Image (cartoon, rainbow, N blue to C red):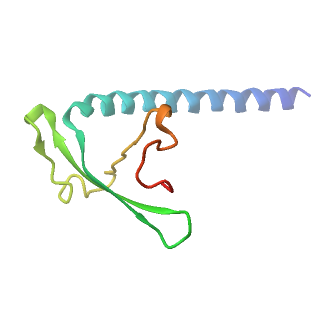
Amino acid sequence: MRTTTRKRRIAQGLMLGALATLALAARGQTSLAWEQTKYFQYNILNVAVAPATAAGSWTVKVMFSVSNPAAGGVPWDLKTAPFQTAPANMTLDIAWAGKEFTNAGSTGAAL
C-alpha cells in the first residue's frame, strides 16, 4: 500500500512540475504575442460570394491585406520572410453581431 501511495505522489509531483513549466512558457508566449499586435491590422478589401457545386452551399472569397499601423499603414509583404519561415502562421478571426443572423433584407434570399 505504501508503494502505491509513494508512486502516486511521485507521479503527482511530476505532473505538477510539468504543468508549472507549461504555464510559465505559455505566459511568456502570450505576452510576447500581444505586444506585437500593435504592428498588424487586417484590412478587408473585398468579399465575393458565389454558389458552390453542392446545393445550398456557397463559396466565399475574402480579399484582404495586412498593414502596419505603427508605421502609418504601410502594407506587409506576406510573401516574404519572416512570414514564410517556420514557425510563422497567420490567424484571421471573423465575427459579426448575432442580431443580423438571418440576412434580413438581403437581395439573395438563399444566402
Whole-percent x, y for residue 9 in the image: 75, 26
Relative to the observer, which residue lies in front, 84 or 65? 65
Residue 82 percent across, percent down from the top left = 21, 52
The N terminus - image quarter: top right
> 105 above or below 70?
below
Could you say where residue 32 lies in the image, as x and y percent from the top left?
A: 31, 31
Based on the displayed image, in which of its 4 quarters is residue 13 positioned? top right
Q: Kindly give the residue lying farthest to the right in the view shown.
A: 1
Check the image and report above or below for 66 versus 12. Answer: below
Residue drawn 25% across the image and 58% down it: 84
In the image, taking residue 4 as reference, residue 99 lies left or right, namely left
Q: Residue at x 43, y 32 (%)?
A: 25
In the orientation shown, which residue stands out farthest toward the bottom? 53
The residue shown at (8%, 35%) is 71
Instruction: Judge by depth and name the residue closer to the eye, 84 or 77.
Output: 77
Query: Residue at left 52%, top 63%?
Result: 57
Q: Point out residue 74 in the picture as x, y percentages from the top left corner.
A: 9, 43
Seen in the picture, residue 34 relative to 52 is either above or below; the reply is above
98 sits left or right of 92 in the view: right
Quarter assignment of residue 31: top left
Relative height, residue 52 to residue 111 (above, below): below
